[in-house]
Image (cartoon, helix red, strand yellow):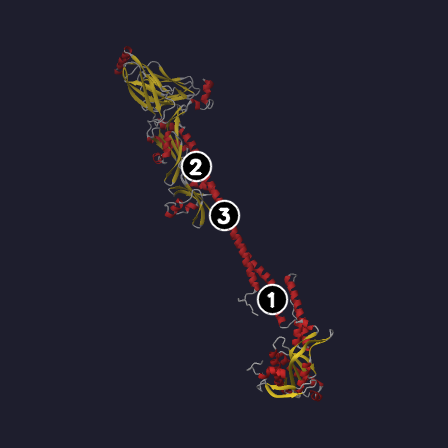
Amino acid sequence: MATIKTIGFHFPFKYKLALSITVIVIGVLAGTFFVLQRRIEANAIRDIKIDLQSTRQIVADLIEERSEHLQELARAVSGGELMRIILTDTSLDRLTCDDIVLNEILPSYPQLSTLGAVDSRGLIRANNPLGPDIATVLASNDQLKNSLNGSIVHGFMRIGRNYHQIIALPLMIGPDDLREMLGVVFVGMTWTATDLAKLRRLSGADIALLSDDAIVSSAGPAFDATPMKNAPAASSFQALANMSGTVPQMHPIGRERYLFLKIESQAETGVPAFAIARSLDAQLGFVQEIQRVMLEFAGVGIVFGIVISFFIAMGIAKPIQALTAAARHVAKDNFGVRVVVRGRDEFAELGDAFNQMIAGLHERDMIRSAFGRYVDHEVARRLLERPEMLRLGGQKRDVVIFMADIRGFSRLSEQLTPEQTVQLLNRYFAHIIGIIKDKGGVVVDFVGDGILVLFDPLERDMPTMASSAVSCAFEMHHRLRHVNEEMIADGLPPIAIGIGLNAGPAIVGNIGSKERAKFGIVGAEVNLTQRIQGEAKPGEVVLSAPLYDRVKHRVRVDRMFTCELKGFRQPRTLYAVGPPDADSPHLSIEQSDP
Amino acid sequence: MRIALLSLIMALSVTFSEAADIEGWIVVMDKSGQSPLKSHAHAIVYLEGFFSEPAGMAVMDQQAKKFMPRLLPAIRGQTIRFDNSDIYQHTVFSTHPTEPFSLPRYGQGESRNVVLHDIGPHPIFCDIHQRMIAEVYVVPNRYFAVTDDRGFFRIADVPAGRHRMRAWHILGGNATLLVDIETGNRSVSLELQSKKTAVETPASQRPAPGGNAADFQQDGYD
């Protein structure tokens, strides 16, 4: 039968189990956190996109509100007498007009950066000398220039690092049916970094005003950190240029991930291009906090998990170890061992079952031992293995029958005390029974000093059993020499035996009644064997002709004789044989027997 | 002295010569020159080249925070009386570069007089009411006319001869035309392009009365 062996290094089960539980716990924790993190991140990105769109609307609303505010301021400024004087009194020189703007009007409107007036002919009448030059405004901004046609126009004007939101308000005068334009008043406010910072506080998004994809002014680290703030780097320039105006795009700034949205300049309103950004990592700050806490918990949990799983593994491994140890004891025929597993779980049941099994084995062993003392061990083994053999009755089959007897035992026993006689017999039988067992024979019965042995070819073929039986006989003679030396040393007389062997059909089985029976062998061949054994001289092995025919090529014939045997009508030819080598009990193996 | 003599000669010639009317139409275009104004009023047409003595007063009234009329012709040297029929006090001033004037504020029923000599438009304003504006146009003689909404004008009894006619609109559009009056009435037409931006609101599109204090005057305070 093939045996499958597993190859691996020795790693106790409890550690494997503890490690497995730990890995599973860590895996589940890590997997849960990974899935959780991905979902939270996806939600955060979605929220940021919504926020960016809201911020975009907030910026548009603020620009609109500022525009309305500027319009109110423009109306207030142009409603004053001074502005009308500037626009109608051509005798006022430019210096005076500028001074009126700077020192007479603007102190009442400190929030204005731009203040100027252009008459209906397009001539600049006044301008805040500290603010943007109206001439530049008109030259560079066609929209604002359109105000000279009587329309209220608002727009943006970039001057240096600042954007100025400007409104041009025509100053109309006259009754309702015909109001003529005295000129256009320009007022404006600066979008400073402070304004952007306020906008950032309001919306929560970083913001930058752009011009030709370069940042003019900004608020928030998303744009402060970019190298394009003062001198746009090619890559940053490219990044802004390629930025979508509709879908927010992820872009890393340093170690932080930002979602950017760029809003292109609007020709109809003059609103310049601007970009807004929100940090995804800032949004996920709480996730990082959760991650940190989870890591701490995971660290503690892993330690606890290892300890707990170790104890769990111990709980599982301990009964197994106990069972293993008990099994090893049982393998060594130590049936006194018992497994103690506390509890009421499956392991306790297994322990009970194992104990029951040990008890069963113990009982069986006791039976076998006791049985084997009175019947041959081989017979006992067979009977235990095959209970059907216990049934009465037998089988007739060819067997080899072996009988040995101590020559002159009656006379010898008279010379010895009963104790010495028993001692002599026990020593003799102890040796020869061992040889019989080794050769596969079955001790069927003891008759005084004689022994009846069966070599049953039930498990091995007949030639093999015949050789074994003959070899057994030679071995017994050979052994007896040593036994005699021992007995002489012990003050006992030496003994000699005669052995007769026969092969032929006999009935093998249980003989007796249900109450008492014995395993035995009956038939004429048994009686014949007893007669053959009677013909053997001390130290001889005498074979019947059928048996001799099976081993004749492997034995040495010392004498061949024909004799009449009691109870048998026909004379029989018998062969006294010995091993080919007189010093060795072994049969020749050079030639095979039929 | 020379001017007075010339005026006398012209007056005599008009008296003793065949006189005729000059009538015509003025179309006022907007600043772009692409569209005519809805109203072609507030344009003055007058003859240049001679002077006449003024007779009587030219009267500019102030009603409902408006100067009435919007364009007042006045012959050079003629007394211009600024009435105040409004319930509010008003001031009157002009930022004319060579002949500015300023009348301190006065109330309802009072008047102030001014005499102007510089030919051309004299814009006048009120210090108190920012929307009040009017033009006093000083003409050299009595041969002038102001257009109605349709742009029609008529200068009656123009003495025969060849005259240079000048037209001016309050939005700055102006033109000159030589007109021969030898064989009777003459009909002319002129197109003026505005130099100022303006917003016209026809009466039908204006807000309903009652929206401001001026309407109270119109409705019952006058």
Residue A324 visible somewhere in the drawing? yes
Contact? badges 1 and 3 (CB < 8 Å)? no
Residue A174 visible somewhere in the drawing? no
Determine if marks 1 and 3 fall on one subunit.
Answer: yes
Question: Can you give x and y, in whole percent of width and height, for residue A239 in the image?
Answer: 40, 46
Question: Can you give x and y, in whole percent of width and height, for residue A518 in the image?
Answer: 70, 76
Q: Amino acid at mark 1?
A: Gln
Mark drawn on residue A321: 1
Residue designated by label 3: A42
In this picture, residue A12 sits left or right of residue B50 = right
Q: Residue at x 39, y 40 (%)?
A: A162
Q: Which of the two residues, A444 or B26, is positioned nearer the viewer here?
A: A444
Question: Can you give x and y, in whole percent of width and height, for residue B27 in the image?
Answer: 35, 22
Q: Amino acid at mark 2?
A: Ile
The Cα atoms of the two marked residues, 2 and 3, are separated by 32 Å
Q: Which of the two residues, A497 or A222, is positioned nearer the viewer here?
A: A497
**Quick one: label 1, few (<14), some, or many (20+) residues within 10 Å?**
some
Mark in the foreground, 1 or 2:
1
- First in sequence: mark 1 vs mark 2: 2
In this picture, residue A148 sits left or right of residue A317 = left
- First in sequence: mark 2 vs mark 3: 3
- First in sequence: mark 1 vs mark 3: 3
Determine if marks 2 and 3 fall on one subunit.
Answer: yes
Q: Amino acid at mark 3?
A: Ala
Where does the N terminus of chain A fall, quadrant-wise?
Answer: bottom right
**Quick one: label 3, few (<14), some, or many (20+) residues within 10 Å?**
few
Badge 2: chain ID: A
Determine if marks 1 and 2 fall on one subunit.
Answer: yes
Q: Could you say whether the residue bearing mark 2 is in a helix, strand or loop?
A: helix
The Cα atoms of the two marked residues, 1 and 3, are separated by 51 Å
